[in-house]
Amino acid sequence: MEIITKNSCQTQKLGEKIGSDLKPGTVIGLSGELGSGKTTFLQGLAKGLGIKKRIVSPTFIFVKQYFVGKINFYHVDLYRIENLKDVSGLGLEEFFNDPDGIVAVEWAEKFPGIFPQKTIKMNFTYLNDQERKIVIKNYNNR
């Protein structure tokens, strides 16, 4: 599935729509260059899950966890992670196996081999100051 959003509001609304549809046990890998809309999308996704807190990229802390109802939302940022050894220290496997968890990982392209087979893969492309192309794979195979 390929979607073009015309502005950041549309990118957030897409995230909100998808977030409201997600079930625990879902893993999402987000790829794309800086400024391509990954965090903006996740702000909407969190809203769709019912999270009221402000969502920012956990670039320096690597993982931010939010709770809503019975759902644990794990927001992971691999931007500053340099090697696979450092990834294993984050506890991602535990997050991926949390039956009450939804995991969203920014910069997933850095370590593609760590993700479960049914991961929803999203690639964000910066088209211009407003527009983003978002390609989604495995969304129907959750």
Image: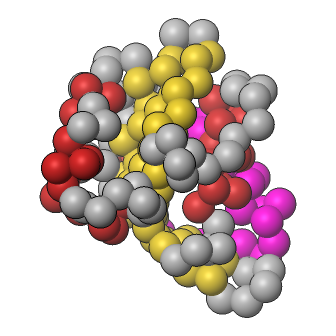
Task: Find residue 124 and report its horizontal and vertical position in percent.
Answer: 53, 72
**Quadrant of the image containing the C terminus:** top left
Identify whether 94 is placed above or below 16.
above
Identity of the residue drawn at 80% across and 80% down: 130
Q: Residue at x 70, y 57 (%)?
A: 40
Towards the viewer: 63 or 137: 63
The residue at the far top in this view is 70
Q: Position of residue 20 (x, y in %)?
A: 63, 34
Would residue 9 be counted in the magenta stretch? yes
Please say whether residue 96 is visible from this viewpoint: no
Span shown in magenta: 1-22
Question: Which of the 4 quarters of the picture holds residue 38?
Answer: bottom right
Q: Is residue 30 left or right of residue 10?
A: left
Is residue 128 rendered to the left or right of residue 45?
A: right
Which residue is painted at 58% across and 74% down in the image?
A: 34
Residue 89 in the image: state x and y as whole percent.
24, 37
Question: Does residue 62 appear left or right of residue 115 in this picture?
Answer: right
Q: Is residue 32 visible?
A: yes
